[in-house]
Image: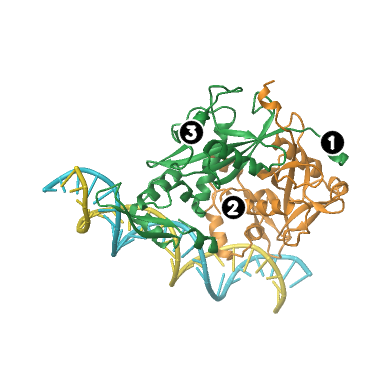
Chain colours: A green, B orange, C cyan, D yellow
Amino acid sequence: MFEYYSHHPRFYVAVDCIIFGFSQGELSLLLLKRKFEPGQGEWSLMGGFVQEGESVDDAAKRVLTELTGLNDVYMEQVGVFGEVDRDPGERVISTAYYALININEYDRQLVEEHNAYWMKIDELPTLLFDHQEMVVKARQLMKTQSATMPIGFNLLPELFTLTQLQNLYEAINGNTVDKRNFRKRVAENPFIVKTPLVDKSGSRRGASLYKFNEEDYKKSLKFKL
Amino acid sequence: MFEYYSHHPRFYVAVDCIIFGFSQGELSLLLLKRKFEPGQGEWSLMGGFVQEGESVDDAAKRVLTELTGLNDVYMEQVGVFGEVDRDPGERVISTAYYALININEYDRQLVEEHNAYWMKIDELPTLLFDHQEMVVKARQLMKTQSATMPIGFNLLPELFTLTQLQNLYEAINGNTVDKRNFRKRVAENPFIVKTPLVDKSGSRRGASLYKFNEEDYKKSLKFKL
DNA sequence: TCAAAAGTGTTAATAGTACACCCATGA
DNA sequence: TCATGGGTGTACTATTAACACTTTTGA
């Protein structure tokens, strides 16, 4: 086409996914024990190569679906990792994305086929290449974004208790907060609404179930917790 | 090497730079009036292709130096732009970076050779491809980062008055703030230190010149303005 | 009846915002 | 002497943080 492009080199372009899940008050990542070279036997993020006719964002979605069977998952771009020797096999430029999934809803068979396991975020194994760095950056970004965007709900079931929500925010921020202060903030948030339903599984007394009203949020696009 | 890679397509990978400058109380971007196809005659960001043996970050630095003659410039990655048809000539995956430079210190001849001009940030021309989107994302990111990282000083001379500093923060945040409140915040910041020097160019009375103590900042890595 | 989680208000401390006048100087 | 930008303090408001006991109910 234009001569402008043709003297320049071309590169393999990949995507890698930092897949967050939440259960039992703890954040986890879905990691692969690699079945192939390079890095066979090592732990890595789920990744894949960008294809012709596919945007980078779409490649990330495809790769996530290949592993989890899920569509319409919340994903955000973390950044480009473009060091020359980051992959010892060949030069590959990779874009990291984080994904937030409901840990109860993925396709267990696909995950098993890929040799993938949930690992608690504070007990992660050593990861190959620069995947460690991707995870650090993804955690940081997710934490920042969760303060001003209602992304945490992607990690919870549609109906959740306030204790679950508080545990989630504590896990994301790596702190603990006072229960009364937390619930006061929730009460001030017009998009977190109480349902008449009660979850009896976590206590004898039972806890009210809440949901996030996404429709109303989309009208205002303001969120704070 | 590994067969793993070889079936996958390869892509041109580029970088584009959103170059911020500050003078007369206004933020500007350094933009090119393109001398070549595709997009000849249109306005664009300064860009270039990643080369073999060069990291993506290094490509961004090189491209910035090609235009401005400056080294050691503050740059941050804004994100990957990977839509299939974003460049009508060929498929190019581009990573945007923003750069903050002291508007008094670039190489004017190089800039002229590249057909580049400073354009006020609120009077930008229409940009080609998805460069508009890159600029929006860069402005947003820069604004966010300037609240918690001492990046604004890259846009100022080493010695600056408090009025200049206030004008800068107002330009970044798109607001105006009370002078006394602003100066109170500055006084609480241990890294912004008064020098005995006075700038008589902006007023009859003269204004004290301040500097940012980068050494002390690096020891604490905490910043707030 | 008691263990275990749910639920509930008030007060103090801190941070942020609003506001107006005098000062120093060169032309 | 006066026009211009530099410099300063206080009172009010809003937000955030600290803190402890009662309720419900199934085992």
Does dot 1 land on a helix, a strand or a loop? helix
- Crowdedness near tag 2: few (<14), some (14–19) or many (≥20) residues, C-alpha within 10 Å: few
Any part of residue B223 in sight: yes
Identify the residue position indicated by label 2 in the image. B144
- Tell me residue B166's x, y (percent): 63, 59
Identify the residue position indicated by label 1 in the image. A6
State the separation of the CA atoms marked 3 and 1.
Answer: 44 Å
Q: Earlier in the sequence, mark 3 or mark 1?
A: 1
- Crowdedness near tag 1: few (<14), some (14–19) or many (≥20) residues, C-alpha within 10 Å: few
- The answer to whether residue B129 is above or below residue A92 is below
Tag 1: amino acid: Ser
The reply to whether discs 3 and 1 touch (Cβ–Cβ < 8 Å) is no
- Tell me residue A101's x, y (percent): 49, 44
Does dot 2 land on a helix, a strand or a loop? helix
Chain designation of label 3: A
- Tell me residue A150's x, y (percent): 49, 54
Q: Quadrant of residue A181?
A: bottom left
Disc number placed over residue B39 in the picture, else none: none
- Mark in the foreground, 2 or 3: 3
Chain designation of label 2: B
Q: Quadrant of residue B213?
A: top right
Tag 2: amino acid: Thr
State the separation of the CA atoms marked 2 and 1.
Answer: 38 Å
Could you say which is closer to the camera, residue A137 or residue B108?
A: A137
The reply to whether discs 2 and 1 touch (Cβ–Cβ < 8 Å) is no
State the separation of the CA atoms marked 2 and 3.
Answer: 42 Å
User: In the picture provided, is D21 more to the left or to the right than A6?
Assistant: left
Co-location on one chain, circles 3 and 1:
yes
Chain designation of label 1: A
Does dot 3 land on a helix, a strand or a loop? helix
Identify the residue position indicated by label 3 in the image. A109
